[in-house]
Amino acid sequence: MKTFIENSKKSNIFWITFLALGFLMAFVITDKAWRKFQNNPTLTSMAIDDEGMKIHFPTITVCPIFQQKVKESEKRKLNQNVLKDFANFPHRLKTLKLFDWSNFFLHQNSSIDMENARSKIFELSPTCNNVLGSCKFNNKEIDCWKYFLPVLSEHGLCYSFNSHFHDTPTNEVLNKHLFLIDSDGNEKLQFQPKIPANIFLNAIDEPLSLKQIHIEETNSQSSTLAFISLKQTKTNGNVRELSTHQRKCVFKDEIQMKYYQDQPYSLSICLRECRIDEAIELCGCLPPFYRPAILNLRFCDVQDTQCFMHHDIWSEEKCSHCYLTCDVTVFSLENVQSISISESSAQTNNFKLEIKHGPILNFYRQVRFGFVDFLVAFGSVLALFLSLSVLSGVEILFCFLHYLSAKIWRRLETD
């Protein structure tokens, strides 16, 4: 301070200018380092693994394009249009903006028991035997109804092969009998759709949702041959020191599910819980195709669908906290071939799926720029532009406290 007072005005201006430039450069570079630490602190490397690993065969889900049960509706002497609309309830909710509900609400006072909405959807939807014909896995005949289990989702009542989750009219249960991929074999799944259906692909730990890969919409005029491949992402343990926003992934044991407490974290379940919260917040009820472990929630009835008409509960704007798991197997659709079937041909419209075998592509996520790296960068910038260090900070603090105590001591002496 004494030197600053004794120097000339030009020298002081020169010194202040360079000090300001030093602070500016230090701020700019530190800001870049902070942004890198917050937005891109991880590095993903790639490696090819030839060793066989225990990987589950993917889940293949068949969602029939709804065909109303006319005979059952006649037995119950209910309006056919009401039955068709009600059994299509989950699908109609998903496509509200494209569907006119004016005719639907004319039948709100029908004799359908809306308190039993979930079981009613099971009752009115096609059974597995009505949806699928012959089924084969690895060229061996299997019973379709035994391995394609019902799954109730935003797509309606579907049937999933090798799914970790399946539904009953009363609740959702886990499936413990799952198929693994044999690294030495050539996995094939083949079945014959009896009615038009949408086919989806997902990993077994991801329940069917709006984000799954859509493979094909089947029809009676063509057969389909689909090839898929798989990739794995593994994450180093030191990545846990970063926040979920920084690493863009979540460890399965890191977050406890709010409604599906008996299931580990997954992206699909996180998005499902986000939609449940949105439905409860906006409409005060739970869509009937969700069945979480916590059952003290009221299911939506037909009247509640008026609420969904005015709110988009499928929007994921409020679900930014949902990420993929840090250790994840992702199945990709490599190629889909459609083969036309002539009317005179004896061939049937089969759907066949094969896994492309070969070396497995693995991605390894690790920390590239962690908190210690940011601290080193921050200290280097301060030392380079301002000649500051931890010791300098201690000296400044000591001088300030010494000056403050001396001033207080002098004032006490004068008093």
Image (cartoon, rainbow, N blue to C red):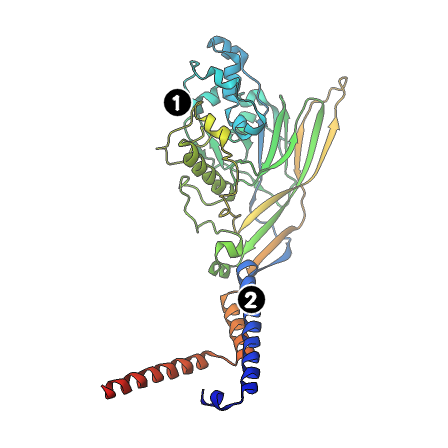
State the image coordinates of residue 144 (x, y, percent, origin top left). 56, 26
Lower sequence index among marks 1 and 2: 2
Relative to 216, say whether 253 is above or below.
Answer: below
Number of residues whose C-alpha sits closer than 10 Å to that of mark 2, classed few (under 14), some (14–19) or many (20 or more): some
Residues 109 and 14: in front is: 14
* Residue assigned mark 1: 115
Asked if 382 appears above or below 298 in the picture, the reply is: below
Q: Badge 2 is on which residue?
A: 33
Name the foreground residue: 131 vs 258.
258
Q: Amino acid at mark 2?
A: Ala
Q: Quadrant of the C terminus?
A: bottom left
The residue sitting at 50% across, 24% down in the picture is: 89
Residue 405, image x, y percentages: 31, 83
User: What whole-number distance in Å separates the C-alpha atoms at marks 1 and 2?
Assistant: 57 Å
Q: Which kind of residue does numbered mark 1 sit on?
A: Glu
Task: Work out which residue is located at the far left of the displayed protein and give it.
Answer: 415
